[in-house]
Image: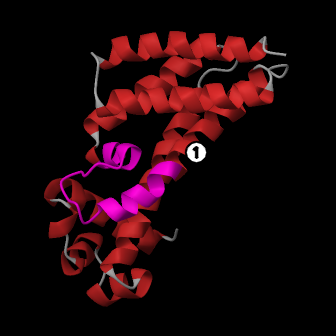
Amino acid sequence: MGETRDAIVEAARAQTVALGWDRVRMGAVAAAAGVSRQTVYNEFGTKAGLGEALARHEVDRFVGEVRAALGEHDTDVRAAAYAAIHRTLASAAENPLVRAVLTSTRGGSEELLPYLTTRSELVLAEAAAALLEWTGKRLPDADPAALAFAADSVVRLVVSHIVLPGGPVDETADRLADLAVRLFLMAATAR
């Protein structure tokens, strides 16, 4: 994305969080981004185009956070799992757009829901792929199918705890990280 597009998407994101997508106006986004209204239309075509770009931006941001959390730990599978899970749970608790992207529930506006819903499977797949890539390098002898199932299961469990929190973020991340390690170790011994 170019600087202008980034500024427009960030302005749309800020307004969506503050007001809800249904109250976001292209003119207000343009003013907040420091560009003309016509520039917003030239970049995205319609409000729907801007909504699609906003959803994609949130998916990329979220998956980037997961990759960064995993990358902070070289060989410690448990620490990496905890970091990624904790960051995801904390982000979802603090960020209505992340929560909406991950759960396909509305973040104050049903109008943004179609864009987020089309991205929910993508974000689940990309988050599981990031986890699978990281664990695959650390557990090279693991059964690939079992490892893929473990990564997908961990991501889906994390999302379920976002939808229906079962306790404090620290405690939930700790328990889910323990479960993730068990699943990954089972995959490593499945051959």
Q: Relative to 168, is 117 on the left or the right?
A: right
Which type of secondary structure does the marked residue at label 1 adopt?
helix
Which of the 4 image quadrants contains residue 28?
A: bottom left
Residue drawn at point x = 83 percent, y = 23 percent: 140
Q: Is residue 99 left or right of residue 60?
A: left
Q: Is residue 67 above or below residue 186?
A: below
Question: Residue under circle 1?
Answer: 125
Main SS of the magenta part reads helix
68 displayed left or right of 186 = left
The spot of residue 82 in percent (x, y) is 50, 18
- Residue 34 position, x and y percent, is 28, 75
Whole-percent x, y for residue 12 in the image:
29, 65
Q: Residue at x 46, y 26 (%)?
A: 157
Q: Is residue 125 above or below residue 176?
A: below
Identify the amino acid type marked 1: Ala
* Depth check, front residue: 120 or 88: 120
- The region drawn magenta spans 97-121
Which quarter of the rendered picture does the C terminus lie within?
top right
Residue 23 appears in which quarter of the rendering? bottom left
Magenta highlight on residue 55: no
The residue lying toward the viewer, choosing from 5 and 169, is 169
Residue 43, relative to residue 85: is it above or below? Answer: below
Where does the image place residue 42, in percent across and percent down from the top left? Answer: 41, 88
Residue at image coords 32%, 19%: 169
Residue 88 at least partly seen:
no
Label 1: how many Cα within 10 Å (few below 14, some 14–19, many 20+): some
Query: Which of 181 and 3 lies nearest the eye of the viewer?
Result: 181
User: Taking 125 as reference, is 29 left or right?
Assistant: left
